[in-house]
Image (cartoon, rainbow, N blue to C red):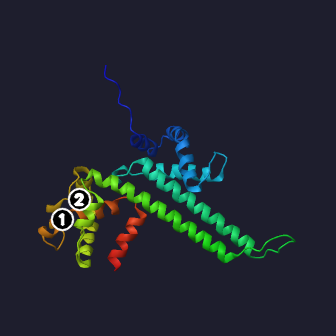
């Protein structure tokens, strides 16, 4: 008798999204160490289940389960890792901002108290934001590199194959937009791991040769638009608006 195949994590999540709440609770419980480790990496200290930050991470992990879409190319854990970190960072910023407001406005100093420099506080929050944004951006790029590998691409390919002129880059990005908005073309890209050049040729004003020349760049941009890449999408937006 053949062994029953073990469900993948992503298949388990699909069942949870279909309403299996008991399975959801079991999954969250089994991944508490992952949540604690992820939250600790943001807070730069040991995090236990009694910490408020852990509760934020727990809620974010549940959010990741609810929002996860396997067709976007990411694994659940890579998606949850980013989402948990974002939510914890948002929480820390909010706490820091609230503390500054309480101390900086309407507070009377008692003997022995030291005045808080609100400008320095704001700068420290901004420094924290830049540092954590930089870390998340780096992790997002690492995750995107893994997705590119499935398509036989690398960042080096993108550097070498990126259109040299701004107009050409914008045209390639507009082609990518057309692709991701078309369910059939997006399916071909994700399932067959190739650019549907023939179908695109019928929908865009550029030649087949131009599409083929920018194939790697169009694939990469399409994957960014399909996936959960906040920082890379900002880059694309900047190129389109420049």
Please give the name of the residue rendered at 44% of the width and 52% of the height, measured from the top-left corner.
79
- Residue 8 position in % (x across, y down): 39, 38
Please identify the residue farthest to the right as the structure is shown. 111
Whether label 1 touches label 2, CB < 8 Å: yes
- Marks 1 and 2, the one that precedes in the sequence: 2
Residue 202 in view (yes/no):
no
111 vs 80, nearest the viewer: 111
- Residue 39 position in % (x across, y down): 56, 52
Quadrant in the picture for the N terminus:
top left
Please give the name of the residue rendered at 38% of the width and 32% of the height, measured from the top-left corner.
6
- Residue 188 position in % (x across, y down): 22, 54
- Residue 167 position in % (x across, y down): 24, 78
Please identify the residue farthest to the top as the structure is shown. 1
Please give the name of the residue rendered at 25% of the width and 50% of the height, measured from the top-left corner.
191
> In the shown orientation, is residue 132 left or right of residue 178?
right
Q: Considering only vertical position in the picture, is 171 above or below 39? A: below
Residue of label 1: 200
Q: Which mark is residue 185?
A: 2
203 vs 221, nearest the viewer: 221
Badge 1 local density, few (<14 within 10 Å), some, or many (20+)? Answer: many
Q: Considering only vertical position in the picture, is 2 above or below 161? A: above
> In the shown orientation, is residue 127 left or right of residue 118?
left
Quadrant in the picture for the C terminus:
bottom left
Please give the name of the residue rendered at 27% of the width and 61% of the height, measured from the top-left corner.
156
> In the shown orientation, is residue 229 left or right of residue 155?
right
**SS of the residue at dot 1?**
helix
Residue 7 in view (yes/no):
yes
22 vs 68, nearest the viewer: 68
- Inter-mark Cα distance, 1 to 2: 8 Å
Badge 2 local density, few (<14 within 10 Å), some, or many (20+)? Answer: some
């Amino acid at each position: 008798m053949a062994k029953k195949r073990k469900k993948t994590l992503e298949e388990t999540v699909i069942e949870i999204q279909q309403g299996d709440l008991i399975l959801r609770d079991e999954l969250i419980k089994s991944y508490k160490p992952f949540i604690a480790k992820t939250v600790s990496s943001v807070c730069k200290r040991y995090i236990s289940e009694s910490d408020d930050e852990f509760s934020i991470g727990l809620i974010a992990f549940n959010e990741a389960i609810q929002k996860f879409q396997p067709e976007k190319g990411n694994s659940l854990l890579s998606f949850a890792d980013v989402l948990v970190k974002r939510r914890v960072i948002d929480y820390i910023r909010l706490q820091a901002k609230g503390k500054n407001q309480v101390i900086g406005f309407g507070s009377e100093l008692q003997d022995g108290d030291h005045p808080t420099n609100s400008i320095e506080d704001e700068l420290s929050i901004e420094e924290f934001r830049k540092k954590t944004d930089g870390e998340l951006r780096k992790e997002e790029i690492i995750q995107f590199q893994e997705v590119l590998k499935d398509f036989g691409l690398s960042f080096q390919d993108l550097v070498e194959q990126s259109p040299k002129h701004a107009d050409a880059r914008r045209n390639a990005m507009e082609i990518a937009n057309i692709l991701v908005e078309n369910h059939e073309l997006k399916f071909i890209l994700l399932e067959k791991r190739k650019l549907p050049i023939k179908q695109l040729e019928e929908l865009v004003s550029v030649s087949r040769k131009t599409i083929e020349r920018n194939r790697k760049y169009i694939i990469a941009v399409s994957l960014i638009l399909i996936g959960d890449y906040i920082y890379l999408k900002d880059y694309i937006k900047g190129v389109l608006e420049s």
